[in-house]
Amino acid sequence: MSPIRTRRRPEPVEIDCESLVVGSGAGGSVAALELARAGRAVTVLEEGPRVTTEDLAAAGPAESMRRLYRNGGATAVLGTPVIAYGEAHAVGGTTVVNGGLLWEPSPTVLDRWAAWSGYRHYRAPVVGTRFAEVRRRLGMTVQDHGDGNQDSRLLADAADTLGWRWQHPQRVVNGCRHRNQCATGCPTGAKQSTALTYLPQAEASGARILPGLRADRIVHDRGTVRAVEAVDTDGRRVRYRPRTLFLAAGPIGTPALLRRSGIHRHTAGRQLALHLNLRTIARFPGVVDATRGTMFTAQVQEHSALGMLIMPSNLTPGGLGAALAGRDPRQVDAFLAARASLGMFTTQVAMQGKARIAAMLGGTPLLRHGMTPADHHTLRLAFRRTATLLFAAGAVELLPPAGTAEPLRSDADVERFCARVRPGDWELVSVHGMGSCPIALPERGGVCDEFGRPYGFHNLYLCDASVLPGAPGISPQGTIMSFAHEIVGRHLEHA
Ligand SMILES: Cc1cc2nc3c(=O)[nH]c(=O)nc-3n(C[C@H](O)[C@H](O)[C@H](O)COP(=O)(O)OP(=O)(O)OC[C@H]3O[C@@H](n4cnc5c(N)ncnc54)[C@H](O)[C@@H]3O)c2cc1C
């Protein structure tokens, strides 16, 4: 009998490096730039592709969704209801597809986090100084109405009528041409994603950015990272041996990598904070032409203390199709026919129940959430406030974010809907995940110490959305990048 022959996997290539960064999004870009500017030899591993502005201009929205988003843009967070979670994988991470909104976290939120986490360092003066640097590097501007954006004008006028507070958004754009394609990658290069700002600057200072390389596992012993095993798109294995490792694989990728590597397996990814988006379609009596304009130019902040923000969202034919999918075909026909008179609006709320990585299936995280009765109550309240605003804006019909609901034409319809809607009826999307490995005392569920190091490790740092102690209630990129600057800056001071 001939012996069974097993094909041995080739030994991985071994590479020594000084500073290794995993992930090149909001947090990883900061690490790459700060370390390179300090003279460190930096290598950045990025699972996703590198795309240029020309690539983005040439691709259709559907192709960009498939190419740039993890799981095509709809990672399922299981529970009642299932929440569709969106994040990107590309050089520049989710900043390539995001709206470019940049807000500073409020002192109140930072104080609350300090009280909860047991660490008082990340508060207003420290974080504010770091935010000023992010704002300067990304070139933040105030986005006024400009061309188009009739949906935002209607919302702002309605807020004025009701005496509600609203603001033009702060964005990192340079000469936005209102092409309304922020979420599939800016085709003109106006949006200042980190792929166009921090990362080229890091490369100019010597950083090496390697797209198409996925960190699979961290090899460690006695609190020291020895190596990171990575795989390229052809399945070739490379083993990096860094002196210091900075993990910035995003709020799900970072805890998933820690758990695959047996690091804080029981706490990493146990609590993921989410902002939830409710999407309401409104029909107006006149033409709105909401596809004309940028993402939005007015955000209603009257209820921000309750964690609620109301704003238009990009209306695109694809987005409208997705929002109408699964509805009664007569409703779909009627709303498609009225396309020029429609606006689509997002109401963001901070979820009080937490999501978590419930299990790792063959190295892939399975996500679940535990939305609470209080969240259901908040969603109803948020929808009521949104309806009040949209009726004040002149809307004649609202399609609420629940697949089975009929169009609503009056306050009484809204009340009936709110009385009937069940938690499982909501159609919810989230594009902001945070706090899956928070900087907090271990007895409070913390994974990292106040330097961003997972407890017990001395050459491993986390510097992305996962370290935030909770949900900031605002678009989080500015907070994430400010924390990352502080974590890497402190590392460089103490090294
Ligand atoms: C449609 C949309 C709109 C948004 N709009 C805004 C906005 O206007 N303003 C705002 O503040 N926020 C916005 N956000 C959210 C914001 O962009 C994210 O919160 C932020 O980018 C998260 O930063 P991060 O560094 O934690 O992760 P990311 O920016 O997601 O970067 C993580 C990177 O790590 C890579 N990675 C993951 N695992 C591995 C691995 N194992 N090996 C190698 N690489 C890996 C990923 O491919 C990814 O590129 C939006 C998000 C979306 C989806």
Image (spheres, rainbow, N blue to C red):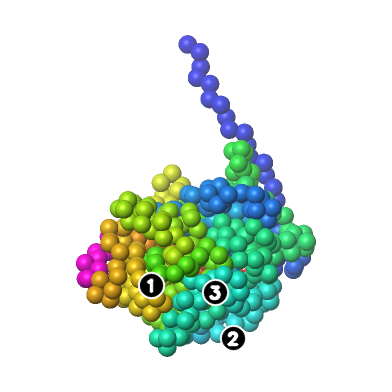
Q: Nearer the viewer, residue 387 or 258?
A: 387
Q: Position of residue 488 (x, y in %)?
A: 64, 70
Left-right relation of 271 to 91: left
Residue span colored magenta: 415-425
Left-right relation of 20 to 184: right
Instruction: Answer whether labels 3 and 2 touch (C-beta < 8 Å).
Output: no
Sequence-first disc among 1 and 2: 2
Q: Position of residue 301 (x, y in %)?
A: 45, 81
- What is the number of the mark on residue 297? 3
Q: Nearer the viewer, residue 292 or 314?
A: 292
Above/below status of 117 relative to 291: below
Sequence-first disc among 3 and 2: 2
Residue 96 appears in the rendering: no
Distance in Å between CA atoms under marks 3 and 2: 29 Å
Mark 2, Cα crowd under 10 Å, few <14 / some 14-19 / many 20+, is few
- Is 418 a magenta residue? yes
Mark 3: secondary structure? loop
Residue holding disc 2 = 125
Q: Quadrant of residue 294?
A: bottom right
Residue holding disc 1 = 395
